[in-house]
Amino acid sequence: MNERTQPSGPDADLDARKEQVLRAVVEEFIASAEPVGSQKVAGSRDLGVSSATVRNAMAALERDGFLTQPHTSAGRIPTDKGYRYFVDHLTRVEALGPPHADTVSRFFAGAEAALDEILHETSQILSRITDHAALVVGPAAASATVMSLQLVPLHADVVLAVAVLSNGVVEKGVVKLASGVGEEVVRRASAALADAAIGSPLGDITTPPATDDDDADDLAARAAEALRSLVIEHASEPVFVGGASHLAAEAQDFSAVDTAARLLELLEQQFLVVSLARNLLDRGTTVRIGAENEQVELRECSVVLAPVQMGQGVAGTVGILGPTRMDYRRAIAAVATVSESLARHLDPS
Amino acid sequence: MNERTQPSGPDADLDARKEQVLRAVVEEFIASAEPVGSQKVAGSRDLGVSSATVRNAMAALERDGFLTQPHTSAGRIPTDKGYRYFVDHLTRVEALGPPHADTVSRFFAGAEAALDEILHETSQILSRITDHAALVVGPAAASATVMSLQLVPLHADVVLAVAVLSNGVVEKGVVKLASGVGEEVVRRASAALADAAIGSPLGDITTPPATDDDDADDLAARAAEALRSLVIEHASEPVFVGGASHLAAEAQDFSAVDTAARLLELLEQQFLVVSLARNLLDRGTTVRIGAENEQVELRECSVVLAPVQMGQGVAGTVGILGPTRMDYRRAIAAVATVSESLARHLDPS
DNA sequence: AACTAGCACTCGCTACTATCGAGTGCTAAC
DNA sequence: GTTAGCACTCGATAGTAGCGAGTGCTAGTT
């Protein structure tokens, strides 16, 4: 389930003692946000060893890069590498807690809507159950075929091309004409365009063959062009962000206050989200911790992503974005559950 | 242009000296975010008076509630009342600066799209030229009439009702059937529904009269119901928020850090925005400063709003949301320009 | 009567100092 | 291998002192 990107070097496996201590530090720090000292570990966990022993283990873990000290004489906090080991070795795949699991299953049981609405609400739900910003990226436009295509005259010289896709998404493009055209011309162009488009993906739409009606041909060509360019400019994959405000609330977890502001700005522009989902080749839930992220803006964040598997292909991606100090167990469980539920809902086979 | 809500009491007009001082304090504080002292006012502005004279004026302004001191022996900062006087008496309506004015006019000159896309981009632009979060509320669904209505079968038992409105907006509702229906039934229901709906607002859609085809009647009734409920649950007015991340960047202007987080959350849920636009009865640009806002959450914010006038009615609202310490001159100019440009674009008569 | 120079006063800010204590690393004993 | 003990580090807190920006007030000037 979890990605293991660490090369199996000398760190491949820690001994049992160190694992226990690392786990304790990570869990305490996630819970309290304060550096964890040896006494807290020895005391609140019943390891059956003294704080001195814990100190030795901690020193070794720091030498090996799993822990770090904000300053001498403070407790330890996990490094990215420490979180990584925790995620890879110390988390069993956990079921989502009943209250949240119920929320998810109840939503998908009752959901009857077009794909874009479902994805939008999915992002809201994932955000609510994780308390982090949630990302949902839909399938590329190429994966849905055109079910209906129609030209609707709005004013004398403005025509709207409306395409209904097999996943329930409706795309539209405005065509502005130099001069008004008659209803009959629009009807003819509409029919020709529908003939050419229905059954194929919207991106593959072609200009219908020429007829003896130049006006209709022109209109159809312009409408086809408008719809084609739509597919391109929409970055081809629809993006939904839920609960971005959580980032602002987590601002204290970031070193600079304006880090949160910059992240919010990036989420608004969706580039980041698409690029995140793009290089997610793995199947199964993937965790990227701090500096493991390729994007510099995310060096203080962690991301938990899972593809939405449909048959062979991938119908989208869901995930969350939060500070490195996040509850990975809950996050992984939530993302996995939601991605699986969404996949099952979209493809009930 | 600006709303004047202050009752004309003894404060109705300040003498020239006090006005000059108040203006200076407001402008300096907006620029520097630091309490303004008498020396700065006497020095950097050439009032031709000494700092002692300014001090006297400041003391009077504080007595009358226009200024306040964060603590003794600090400079003054404006109160809500001080900002109010500034906005009402000390700002000429200013033209938007050329670079930004160009941005706006160039956008509206080139904009050819459906209403919802235009409104969305308008919120982006308004946010960019003001450096604050921007709000755009569209016209109620009732103001547009149905141009086309069509039922499109997606799967055996799922039919999508797609309505194209006169403003280019496309609304859609999913109808899930207990059992599959034939193409012919769908076609018949679609035609009946279109007959009943085209030309009226989507909210007024009625179930078409019964025919001898029970399946088609049932489908048409359910589709009509789905579309009607859409109008209700969409709060009837579409909302677009642009540049919400500015709020996070302005977090230092708010007393508590999490105020910004809460505001972001409220903006995500759109309630707040709609209610803001709702009780905007005035025509012309309206400014609400700090505690003047009815919503408690906005007590540390200011809002600049303007209706989008179309003929007699109001086609929507545009505005911005920022800290009370905002550049009201720029904000008012930007909101006024954008609302007028938008109105002209929507109703070029 | 309005303005201003002067001055005592306030009080946040910074720097310095002392103390406290959580936490550490190390050593020696078990 | 574990642990008790201990010296040590260093952030956090509190108290003190001086600085200086800024004020209010008074007395003198225009």
Image: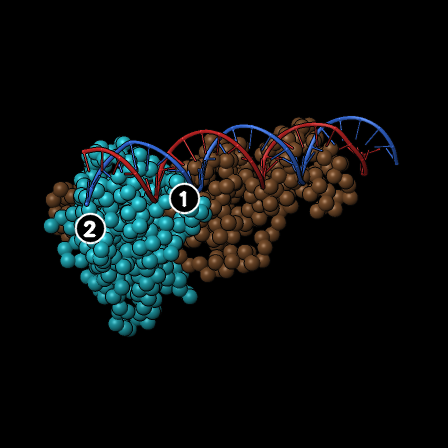
Chain colours: A brown, B cyan, C blue, D red
Q: Earlier in the sequence, mark 2 or mark 1?
A: 2
Please tell me whether mark 1 sits on a helix, a strand or a loop: loop
Residue visible at 27% across and 59% down? B279
Q: Is residue A65 above or below residue A317?
A: above
Q: Is residue A282 visible?
A: no
Establish whether labels 2 and 1 are both on one chain. Answer: yes
Residue visible at 65% across and 37% down?
A75
Q: Which residue is mark 1?
A: B71
Q: Nearer the viewer, residue B277 or A1?
A: B277
Residue B44, by quadrant, is top left
- Report in which chain the residue with disc 2 lies: B
Q: Amino acid at mark 2?
A: Asp
For label 2, the residue is B13
Q: Which mark is residue A183?
A: none
Label 2 Cα neighbours within 10 Å, binned few <14 / some 14-19 / many ≥20: few
Q: Position of residue A149 (x, y in %)?
A: 28, 50
Quarter assignment of residue A324: top right
Residue A125 visible in the snapshot:
yes
Q: Residue at x 58, y 53 (%)?
A: A96
Query: Which residue does the image show at 49% across and 52% down from the upper left?
Result: A128
Instruction: Depth check: give the residue in front, B257 or A209.
Output: B257
Mark 1 burial class by Cα count in 10 Å: few <14, some 14-19, many 20+? few
